Image (spheres, rainbow, N blue to C red):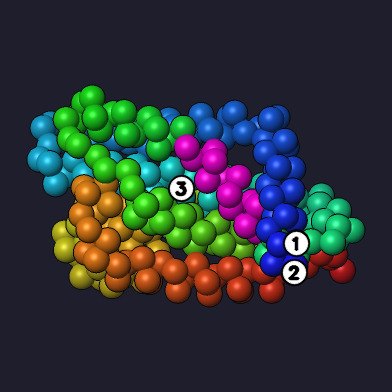
Amino acid sequence: MVLRRFFLNTLILFKMQVALYRFLGFFTAIVAVLVPLGTLFLILFTSGSTSEEHAYLLLAGNIVVSLVNTCITSLGQYIGNMKEARGFEFYATLPVSKLSLVLALMCSNIMLSLPGFIAVGILGWLILGIQISIGPGFFLAVILTAATMASIGTMIGVTSKTGQQANHISLVAMFVFIFLAPVYYQIESLPLVLQWWGRIQPVTYGANAIRAALAGLPVSVYLGDLIILLALATVSLTIVTKGIKWREG
């Protein structure tokens, strides 16, 4: 009964977020498409032809970039502005848990990332000429990566003093998680210091798992990445839900 009520509350909150995104979700979805595709075209134009292995790197990297864009940058800014407007006080009046709210926000941001996934998949099929596999392993890798990213974005929002501060921090986080991590290339190609840094970043394991899933490799190949993502998502969701305050002051 308690579990059923939890899922029902989460679903209601998710529908509320989707309704709110009618006003700004279109622009977020457009950015979720343009940023990864723009980066991908830049890499293709400057590097020329790509091998099959490099093509999978690019596709997985673009999916991760789309998740970072929506689940860290956009979500961090959204929650920072909501906190400044004392929006959490509204949810304090509802019989819902903090975890339900975080999961609803996470799921709604994954939904905003879908146009980017579709665009990247079509591009991989038409331009890069590779076969992609969309199965349970792929969706599991995306969900676990998104959960970790959403926790980071939520933490940025709830710990920022103002909405403007959340905007700045989320942009810095986007740079760190995209350009200082092995998203578009193998971790072995980085300098040793950045290899150490990359191994503690969740996007590294998310990119590895998504890349292997797209290539149609068995789940056993990237099971270790999925386990690490699950552990990171569990810990980060626990921390962020405890950090949310329904009322400030």
Label 1: element kind: helix
Label 1 packing within 10 angstroms: few (<14), some (14-19), many (20+): few
The residue that appears at 45% across and 60% down in the rendered structure is 144
Residue 73 can be seen in this image: no
The reply to whether discs 1 and 2 touch (Cβ–Cβ < 8 Å) is: yes
**Which residue has dot 2 on it?**
2
Answer with the quarter of the image where residue 95 lies. bottom right
Query: Relative to residue 17, is residue 72 depicted above or below?
Result: below
The residue that appears at 62% across and 33% down in the rendered structure is 25
Determine if the magenta segment contains residue 105. yes
* Kind of residue at disc 1: Arg
Q: Residue furthest toward the top?
A: 126
Q: Main structural element of the magenta stretch: helix, strand or loop?
A: helix
Mark sitting earlier along the chain (1/3): 1
Query: Relative to residue 227, is residue 169 depicted above or below?
Result: above
Q: CA distance from mark 2 to mark 3?
A: 31 Å
**Which residue has dot 1 on it?**
5
**Quarter of the picture holding the C terminus:** bottom right
**Front: mark 2 or 3:** 2
**Quarter of the picture holding the N terminus:** bottom right
* Kind of residue at disc 2: Val
Label 3: element kind: helix
* Residue 155 percent location from the top left of the image: 61, 63
Q: Nearer the viewer, residue 110 or 66?
A: 110
Label 2: element kind: helix
Mark sitting earlier along the chain (2/3): 2
Q: Which residues are magenta?
A: 102-114
Label 3 packing within 10 angstroms: few (<14), some (14-19), many (20+): many
